[in-house]
Amino acid sequence: MLNLGRKYQMRRQFRTTTTISGFTLVELLTVLIVTAIILTLAAPSFRDAGAKSALKTTAMDLVAAINNSRAQAVNLGTVATLGATDGASWSNGWNMSMPAPHDTENQDFDPKANVTVTTTGGETFLDFRRDGTTSAQVTFRICHNHLTGETGREIAINRLGRTTNQEYTCP
């Protein structure tokens, strides 16, 4: 009888129960649907954040170009011209140009995608004189095409060459 007891114990010792772990198809589909809903709700927010960043970057680039043009005109004692790259639209970019022999200081700037830059008077260029004054008073309006009714930027330059940068409600 002693032998039978050992056999029974040995069988019991090697008997294993198998458990299967993992996700069912229903659980997996539920997680995918919830994730898709969350991403759908968050996508417009990400798009708006990118548009606002592009608008802010373009405004900062334009202010930097204005300040740089004025500073170069004063430092080099010559006229510095800031104008639309194509001579028609600031939305296609702008450049700072200097007369020879300072023409190595010329710089080109490009606005970010879907950002429009306009002037209230239709000016296509602005001259900064050696004393820092300008040839005209100009107001730039910067808006993003995907942010209608949102806040853009309005950059104004007076005849003394001073710049103001404030919020503007885009049409």
Image (spheres, helix red, strand yellow):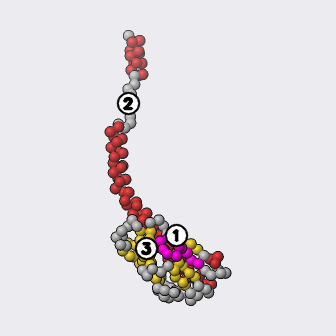
Whether the residues at callouts 3 and 1 have beta carbons within 8 Å, the answer is: no
Q: Going 34% across and 70% down the picture, which residue do you hit? A: 149
Query: Would you name the residue on which mark 1 appears?
Result: 110
Q: CA distance from mark 3 to mark 1?
A: 13 Å
Helix, strand or loop under label 1: loop
Highlighted range, magenta: 85-97
1 vs 155: above or below: above
Tell me the amino acid under the disc marked 2: Thr
Position of 161 compared to 18: left or right? right
Tell me the amino acid under the disc marked 1: Asp
Query: Would you name the residue on which mark 3 appears?
Result: 142
19 vs 156: above or below: above
Helix, strand or loop under label 3: strand
* Residue 11: in magenta span: no
Residue nearer the viewer, 135 or 71:
135
Around disc 1, counting alpha carbons within 10 Å, would you say few (fewer than 14), some (14 to 19), or many (20 or more)? Answer: some
Query: Would you name the residue on which mark 2 appears?
Result: 19
User: Marks 3 and 2: which is nearer the front?
Assistant: 3
- In which quadrant will I find the N terminus? top left
Disc nearer the start of the sequence (1/2): 2
Whether the residues at callouts 3 and 2 have beta carbons within 8 Å, the answer is: no
Around disc 2, counting alpha carbons within 10 Å, would you say few (fewer than 14), some (14 to 19), or many (20 or more)? Answer: few
